[in-house]
Amino acid sequence: MDEPILKAQGLTKKYGENVVFKDIDLAVQQGDIIVIIGPSGTGKSTLLRCLNLLTKADGGKIWLDGEEITAPGHNEDEVRQHIGMVFQNFLLFNHLTALDNVMLGLTKVKHLPREQALEKALSELKRVGLADRAGHYPGQLSGGQQQRVAIARALAMDPRVMLFDEPTSALDPELIGEVLEVMRQLALQKMTMLVVTHEMGFAREVANRIIFMEKGSIIEEGTPDELFLRPKFERTREFLWKITELYGHKHETTQPTEDL
Amino acid sequence: MIEWLQFLWQTLPVFLDGLRVTLELTAVGLIMGFVLGLLAALGRIYGSPWVRRVCVAYIEVFRGTPLLVQLFLIYYGFPGIGITFSRMASAYLALGLNSGAYQAEYLRGSIMAISEGQMMAGRSIGLTRFATIRHIILPQALRLVIPAWSNEPILLLKSTAVAFLIAVPDLMTKAKLVAARTYDPIGTYLAVAVIYLIIVALLSEVMKALERRVRIPGLEVETQKP
Ligand SMILES: Nc1ncnc2c1ncn2[C@@H]1O[C@H](COP(=O)(O)OP(=O)(O)O)[C@@H](O)[C@H]1O
Ligand SMILES: [Mg+2]
């Protein structure tokens, strides 16, 4: 097997006495689209934050393209530009236009000349279908549009892998489709992705692997068919059943939006 | 009334002289206080435990003691340990240090409100901590703080009157002179009150204009929060 893009071994995270997760092993290969599911409070968000070093793990190691990024003295800021992150609540820079949100990393992190950054930022906005909203501030955009700008902001850094933390959970139902559609497009472009989501339609259709996490451990992982049709554990079956009940399949079908 | 206006007209040059000093005290105190306050707020939020302790101590000491005591300590107390400040320098220092402690607390509130979330977002694209504070957090926090902070210039303007007690030639000191010379304390102090009032009204307008000017489109609701 090829060298994984992102690999974690024995990853452990505690907050004081509270062990969030323990001994997590994970390998993300080039082109993988891995969906992580699991009940709330299981440590999925914390896991993603540990993977791009936004939170320091208490144990275990992480490698990016074979290089250990948890090694002492490793430049964390350098690492983060190669790992894109999309948050549940968008977290756009509210004082900047959509274009400037996408450009900031290009000018301040990659130190590209302004024209080049502008061109790149515009093309990323186009990629998420928002070229016509470049001059809008986050407060002037819908939740779905904000999340697409957030995706463009992460993509602009040309990351090796994109982490999504429940990217559609904060959205009104009618806005979920446009974000999932952008993510589907990324999948078609062979972007490597690690996605925490409860959108089971998306997971079944797009993921090549699903990881079921509960109480800080990986309970089961496999292809969508393995988990949906032949889960090894009763807990997996129960959770999938509950989640499908809750979220249904209403977003399963593609909802094309006019500007895509 | 007519008489009083005539009186005001005649004494105005003296008052304006004092007003200039009062405005200087306010401006220097405000700017010095802003720089100190920003450093103290940043130090208290992002600093190492040691830096944090120093910032907390500064803020608590200067908010917890009367401005007048601070002024007297600087002007009358420091010569005792061999450091002498002029009247003006003492007043600047006391006002700046005092205002800084208050401004630190205003700024701390808004920086923390913005930092939650925005720090993570900034760092997620590879910005350093310092770059995130500079490019993401401060531009938003400084806008957010304006409504609360806009009291500070007004409070400070009024606080400068304590400089009278170490005979800095500010508006109050001039008023005392005029009152003694004209035997009309009521007319004099009324005139002074009116002058302070006009400046305060002007400052309020400036603050409102500033708030409008830096408003972020689409975020109107947030910036108008009391
Ligand atoms: N900054 C933090 N400080 C203390 N506890 C935290 C912090 N962040 C998360 N936790 C705890 O870690 C656990 C997992 O949280 P999280 O990763 O958000 O779960 P999930 O994303 O799966 O819902 C929760 O019990 C939560 O209370
Ligand atoms: Mg979560």
Image: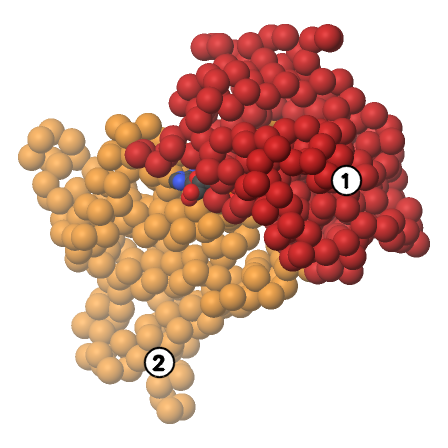
Chain colours: A red, B orange
What residue sits 59% from the left and 31% below the top?
A220
Q: Secondary structure at mark 1?
A: helix
Please say if B205 is above or below A11. Answer: below
Name the residue: 35% across, 66% down. B15
Residue highlighted by disc 2: B7
Residue A201, position as x, y percentages in the image: 77, 46
Relative to A184, residue B15 above or below: below
Q: Is residue A1 left or right of residue B130?
A: right
For the question of whether residue B137 can be seen, the reply is: no
Q: Chain of mark 1?
A: A
Label of residue A204 in the image:
1
Instruction: For the residues labelled 1 and 2, say whether their Cβ atoms are less than 8 Å apart.
Output: no
- The three-letter amino acid code for the residue at tag 2 is Phe
Q: Nearer the viewer, residue A88 or B14?
A: A88
Compared with residue B78, is residue B6 higher up or lower down, i.e. above or below? below
Which labelled disc corresponds to residue B1?
A: none
Q: Label 1 amino acid? A: Arg
Q: CA distance from mark 1 to mark 2?
A: 87 Å
